[in-house]
Amino acid sequence: MAASAASGDAQAGQMMLRRTDADWFDLPKSRLAQVLRPRSIPSEVVAGGGTHRIRVSGIEISFSAEDPGWLISFEGDLLEADAQRIVDEICRNIVEFTAQEAVVVPL
């Protein structure tokens, strides 16, 4: 995964994870660290703003419970394709954990 983007490459900013069949995911706060992380890329939980925050490849990613869904913000240089891969993995985690369908919404 590229840690920074070359000139002209699309940069990651924010995405939203939403349920397709209702408003809110049935995801208890005690399971956020287990579910809101990519599986194929090492990550660690870090302190900071938002409901939950991780660091992946030197980039901080914050998760904020929004109306309705999870607002995901990328803080640092990350290619949009790499951000999409991370969010797609997290989306699959949510679907597997909650058995609720979800969609990634680019913002």
Image (cartoon, rainbow, N blue to C red):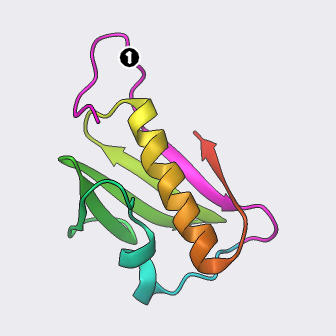
Q: Secondary structure at mark 1?
A: loop
From where the camera sits, is residue 32 visible?
yes
Q: Is residue 106 magenta?
A: no
The 10 Å Cα crowd at callout 1, few under 14, some 14 to 19, many 20 or more, is few
Q: Position of residue 18 (x, y in %)?
A: 66, 60
Residue 67 in sight in this render = no
Q: Is residue 21 above or below residue 106?
A: below
Q: Is residue 59 above or below residue 99?
A: above
Please determine whether, in this image, residue 12 is positioned above or below residue 5.
Answer: below
Relative placement, left or right, of 94 versus 51 is right
Q: Quadrant of the C terminus?
A: top right
Q: Is 94 placed left or right of 45 in the picture?
A: right
Predominant secondary structure, magenta span: loop
Magenta residues, start to end: 1-23
Q: Identify the image quadrant of residue 102.
A: bottom right
For disc 1, the marked residue is 9
Q: Residue at the location (59% across, 40% down)?
A: 106
Please check the rendered image and state whether residue 22 is part of the magenta-colored stretch, yes or no.
yes
Image coordinates of residue 47 in percent, x first then y, are: 20, 70
Coordinates of residue 103 in the picture (x, y in percent): 68, 53
**For residue 2, what is the image quadrant?**
top left
Give the residue furthest to the left.
Answer: 58
